[in-house]
Image (cartoon, grey):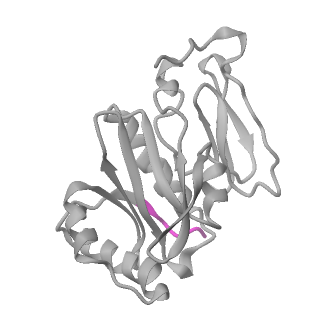
């Protein structure tokens, strides 16, 4: 049986926030022989923090830092070592994207560790510029597709939803939902681009282009 996992806000200063900081320390800094700096912890005041929780506590975390009225930076995604392979990172990313979209932000940027950029690329993030070093290891800047495009199609999907291991709902053209048997993760975003897949090696891409037949107006700006 799949263990219940929820993704929720972790307000700055709360117990959930402190547990999220401990997880960031364990996963992102300790293996590098580092600790979270005072500057990073001070920056936390400017961020929105989210975490994945299960019976044993916080098992994943991510944060968003608004950069201006349009753009946010996704920072410090971390998932507990013993809970990897459960799609927790996908859920955290989807929750953060949904929050940003609902708050009117249209662009997400991030600094991905080299080697992890493939994860974000699956969801439409594109690399920009060359490799640079941050916290002693190589990173690359990545940018998401314009989050506002989904709104032009009537809000195709506001956020990733957790689906059971027995079925999945595909977002179909013309606003209709179609059930699909199997275990999979799908996200139709930006007028029908499928951004996420769970167990992709078993269930190959099923792509619904809602933008076909000119149903989506062109993006502005």
**Residue at (44, 37) in percent of width and height:** 107
Q: Position of residue 71 (x, y in %)?
A: 37, 39
Q: Is residue 172 above or below residue 10?
A: above
Q: Main secondary structure of the magenta part?
A: loop
The quadrant the N terminus occupies is: bottom right
Segment tinted magenta in the rendering = 1-6
In the displayed structure image, the side of residue 21 where residue 53 appears, left or right: right
Q: Quadrant of residue 33?
A: bottom left
Depth order, front residue of 8/165: 8
Q: Position of residue 25 (x, y in %)?
A: 37, 81
**Residue at (51, 55) in percent of width and height:** 91
Q: Is residue 143 above or below residue 102?
A: below
In the displayed structure image, the side of residue 201 where residue 42 appears, left or right: left
Q: Is residue 57 visible?
A: no
In the displayed structure image, the side of residue 181 where residue 139 appears, left or right: left
Q: Position of residue 15 (x, y in %)?
A: 21, 73
**Residue at (52, 46) in percent of width and height:** 161
Depth order, front residue of 88/216: 216
Depth order, front residue of 166/50: 50
Q: Quadrant of residue 207?
A: top right
Q: Is residue 34 above or below residue 47?
A: below
**Residue at (71, 25) in percent of width and height:** 209
């Amino acid at each position: 049986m799949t263990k219940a996992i929820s993704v929720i806000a972790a307000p700055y200063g709360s117990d959930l926030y402190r547990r999220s900081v401990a997880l960031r320390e364990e996963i992102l800094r300790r293996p590098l022989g580092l600790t979270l700096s005072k500057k990073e912890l001070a920056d936390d005041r400017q961020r929105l923090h989210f975490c994945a929780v299960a019976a044993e506590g916080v098992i994943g975390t991510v944060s968003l830092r608004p950069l201006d009225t349009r753009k946010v930076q996704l920072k410090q995604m971390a998932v507990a070592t013993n809970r990897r392979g459960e799609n927790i990172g996908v859920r955290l990313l989807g929750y953060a994207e949904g929050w940003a979209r609902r708050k009117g932000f249209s662009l997400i940027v991030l600094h991905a560790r080299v080697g992890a950029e493939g994860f974000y690329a699956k969801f439409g993030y594109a690399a920009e510029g060359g490799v640079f070093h941050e916290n002693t290891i190589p990173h690359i800047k990545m940018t998401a597709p314009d989050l506002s495009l989904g709104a032009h199609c009537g809000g195709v999907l506001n956020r990733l939803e957790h689906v059971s291991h027995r079925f999945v709902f595909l977002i179909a053209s013309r606003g209709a939902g179609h059930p699909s048997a199997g275990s999979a993760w799908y996200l139709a975003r930006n007028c029908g681009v499928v951004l996420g897949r769970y167990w992709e090696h078993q269930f190959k891409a099923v792509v619904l282009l809602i933008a076909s037949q000119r149903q989506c107006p062109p993006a502005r700006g």
